[in-house]
Image (cartoon, rainbow, N blue to C red):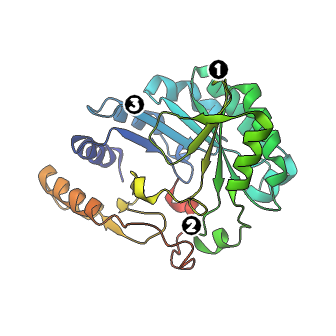
Amino acid sequence: MTFDEIERLVRIFAALGVDKVRLTGGEPLLRRGLPNLAARLSKIDGVADLSLSTNGTQLARHAETLREAGVSRINVSLDSLKSSRVQRIAGRDALPRVLEGLQAANAAGFTLVKVNMVAMRGVNDDEIEDMVMFCMEHGFTLRLIEAMPMGDSGRSVRYLDLQPVRRRLQAQFGLVDGVMPGGGPARYLQTADGQFKVGFITPISQHFCATCNRVRLSVDGTLHLCLGQEHQYRLQPLLRGGATDAELKQVVRAAIATKPERHEFRHHPRKVVRVMSALGG
């Protein structure tokens, strides 16, 4: 989609009551002029919160511009603090660039930077406490995420149940129940003084389908209603076929009405053939 098409659709969603927008990917910062799009979206009436998810490799050179454009929150994917593991997980040693990006986000004045760590059994589960200490030291919020069986690559990941991890961290660091702004699926614990928070995103062990408030708009204009189902609506043909805003609103309402009751990762793990990197978090 062009930036004009994206802006038009976001205006329609905002008019229907959506007040939180996230730019994600793939890697959104590879899109030429992405900060300009962020500036356009942040000015839309009704958009109260504009955030961005990134792998962090391009963040150092864009952090200040993104902050000026109106992005309020940054999520950075970081599954390990060891270069050799980052190389094995991501296919390249991007750790120095990711760490540089995180520092740049702090320097640019982002007050809420979240580090997203997909916890994988036998891969990086021995680093969870180290990641907690890293985020405590630098003022980041940590979010631990259960791997979802999306596509062959996702199904090959060794799933780790985060419920025992939650209990372990709660006891080890003296954490208590906490909350965070954003309206997302994470359930949070925090230190008694509230200075550090860790969230647990548990689509498998403790799904949050009943409170899911998200849909995803892909780069080709397809509206996806659930990561764990194939429900989708193609909006780009309507945009380029002369549909009015009123007609688009009607289609969006109809699409939201088909949002499924819950995913089927446990019962039908091979049902979803797309991969997370192609759709976004």
Find residue 255 and report its horizontal and vertical position in percent.
27, 63
The vertical placement of 110 against 50, above or below, is: above
Per the image, label 3 sits on a secondary structure element best described as helix
Q: Is residue 60 rendered to the left or right of residue 127?
A: left
Per the image, label 1 sits on a secondary structure element best described as helix
* Among the 4 quarters of the image, the one containing residue 241: bottom left
Say whether residue 32 is visible.
yes
User: Circle 3 sits on which residue?
Assistant: 39
In front: label 3 or label 2:
2
Per the image, label 2 sits on a secondary structure element best described as loop
Q: Residue at x 33, y 34 (%)?
A: 47
User: Circle 1 sits on which residue?
Assistant: 107
Pick whichever of labels 1 and 2 is earlier in the sequence. 1
Q: CA distance from mark 1 to mark 2?
A: 33 Å
Q: Residue at x 48, y 44 (%)?
A: 184
Pick whichever of labels 3 and 1 is earlier in the sequence. 3
User: Circle 2 sits on which residue?
Assistant: 275
Q: Amino acid at mark 2?
A: Val
Q: CA distance from mark 3 to mark 1?
A: 20 Å
Find residue 60 and report its horizontal and vertical position in percent.
65, 31
Q: Residues within 10 Å of mark 2 (few under 14, many from 20)?
A: some
Say how many tags the image has.
3
